Image (cartoon, grey):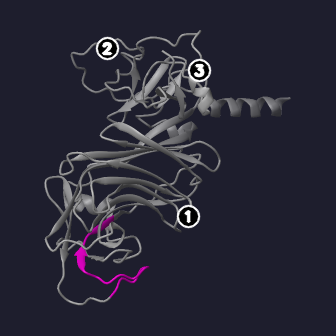
């Protein structure tokens, strides 16, 4: 009995101090070359060549094809007029361009410890014939997996692709208006089973598509490259080509237990025993906006309504790497039918809308999408 009591106390202690922590992995990495090179390597993870006609160049002392300007990374492609042979990668096209690519030094893996990721950036992409810019996740050990966040193939259509195998691929295509302007491309990845993740794709804050893939436990590199010709389906331009990116961000939730959570300033605001954590998020300076949400003044009120976590107190978001409360405009009607069940989802216990599609309004509870009946 004494042994049982000790084990029970130990388990309850672990439960009491279990947290979800938000970690920022890449942010403000484009300010200067010293900072940049802490987060990014030049070229592809495997070298200079890939499946297009551009060969990638760039080092810490050669910034001709990868350079920084005003907190922006610029990849520059220039056509060459000499024979440089063929790409060393399949399908071995002739090299017609020198260009630039970068990849993250860190790899990113969705698993039980890191069940959610947010990856985003703002990009100004070339869309003329023969250009092939991309911002994508590629398997660090094998291919596939692959998740394409930005991919343009010689037009103003972006391809969201998820490769499970070379022949098992989900694709969603979106035409981009005002193609010469900056646009934000974002994915939210969440672990939904022991093997599968859901990938939600957004452009300029608007939800576009969801893919599901068996990518749990598979490490990824994040890559930005300006490839040419290849899958773009045409001859590339003779003029110079530029692919620009800024505000590139990677963050994730981390499950931690016990003392390892005690020094986290952005730990989840609740525990499984429904007590507040012993550490609180650093509160940003208050504005003149109403602070009427349930979490104030212990935690600030969110300006947006993207739900990361839900407990009995309400819906929580993360802004500026800190937890904040989301004020629901009302509560769901108890008499309303749950339209989301026919799509394989439950309905939310709150009214905070994360996105809307042709089916209706959607929210998130405990990292799972749910329909809103408010």
SS state under label 2: loop
From the image, tell me which residue sits under label 2: 291
Residue 15 part of the magenta segment? no
Which residue is pictured at 32% across the width and 53% down the height? 157
Circle 3 residue: 338
Q: Residues within 10 Å of mark 1 (few under 14, many from 20)?
A: few
Instruction: Give how far across and how far down residue 97 sits, in percent.
Output: 23, 77
User: Residue 46, labelled with which disc?
Assistant: none
The kind of secondary structure element at disc 1 is: loop
Is residue 268 left or right of 195 when viewed as pictured? Answer: left
Identity of the residue drawn at 18% across and 63% down: 242
* Left or right: where 339 falls relative to 101: right
What is the residue that sits farthest to the right in this orientation? 1
CA separation, marks 3 and 1?
36 Å
The Cα–Cα distance between marks 1 and 2, rounded to whole angstroms, is 51 Å
Left or right of 30 on screen, residue 222: right
Residues in magenta, as a range? 86-102
Residue 344 higher or lower than 260, as above or below: above
Q: Nearer the viewer, residue 139 or 38?
A: 139
Q: Earlier in the sequence, mark 3 or mark 1?
A: 1
Taking the spot 34% from the left edge, 53% from the top edge, the residue there is: 158
Q: Which disc, if any, is residue 167?
A: 1
> Which of the 4 image quarters holds residue 75?
bottom left
Residue contact between numbered discs 3 and 1, judged by CB atoms under 8 Å:
no
Q: In terms of secondary structure, what is the magenta stretch mainly?
A: loop
Residue 214 visible to an observer of this rendering: yes
**Label 2 vs label 3, nearer the camera:** 3
Residue 252 in sight in this render: no
């Amino acid at each position: 009995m004494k042994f049982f009591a000790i084990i029970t106390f130990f388990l309850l202690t672990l439960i009491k101090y279990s947290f979800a922590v938000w970690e920022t992995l890449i942010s403000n990495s484009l300010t200067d070359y010293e900072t940049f090179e802490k987060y990014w390597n030049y070229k592809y993870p495997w070298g200079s060549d890939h499946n297009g006609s551009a060969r990638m160049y760039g080092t810490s002392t050669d910034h001709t094809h990868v350079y920084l300007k005003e907190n922006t990374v610029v990849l520059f492609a220039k056509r060459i007029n000499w024979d440089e042979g063929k790409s060393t990668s399949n399908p071995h096209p002739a090299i017609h361009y020198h260009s630039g690519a970068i990849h993250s030094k860190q790899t990113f893996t969705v698993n039980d410890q890191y069940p959610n990721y947010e990856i985003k950036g703002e990009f100004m992409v070339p869309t003329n014939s023969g250009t092939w810019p991309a911002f994508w996740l590629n398997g660090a050990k094998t291919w596939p997996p692959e998740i394409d966040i930005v991919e343009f193939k010689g037009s103003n259509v972006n391809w969201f692709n998820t490769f499970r195998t070379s022949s098992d691929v989900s694709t969603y295509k979106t035409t981009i208006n005002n193609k010469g302007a900056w646009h934000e491309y974002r994915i939210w990845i969440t672990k939904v089973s022991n093997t599968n993740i859901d990938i939600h794709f957004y452009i300029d804050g608007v939800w576009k598509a969801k893919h599901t893939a068996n990518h749990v436990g598979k490490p990824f590199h994040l890559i930005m490259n300006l490839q040419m010709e290849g899958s773009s389906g045409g001859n590339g331009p003779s003029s110079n080509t530029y692919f620009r990116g800024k505000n590139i961000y990677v963050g994730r939730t981390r499950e931690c237990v016990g003392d390892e959570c005690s020094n986290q300033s952005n730990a989840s605001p609740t525990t499984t025993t429904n007590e507040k954590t012993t550490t609180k998020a650093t509160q940003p300076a208050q504005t003149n906006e109403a602070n009427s949400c349930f979490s104030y003044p212990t935690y600030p009120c969110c300006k947006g309504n993207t739900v990361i976590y839900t407990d009995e107190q309400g819906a929580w978001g993360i802004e500026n790497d800190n937890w904040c409360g989301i004020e629901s405009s009302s509560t769901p009607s108890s008499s309303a039918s749950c339209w989301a069940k026919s799509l394989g989802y439950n309905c939310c216990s709150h009214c905070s809308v994360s996105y809307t599609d042709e089916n209706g309004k959607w929210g998130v509870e405990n990292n799972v999408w749910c329909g809103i009946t408010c």
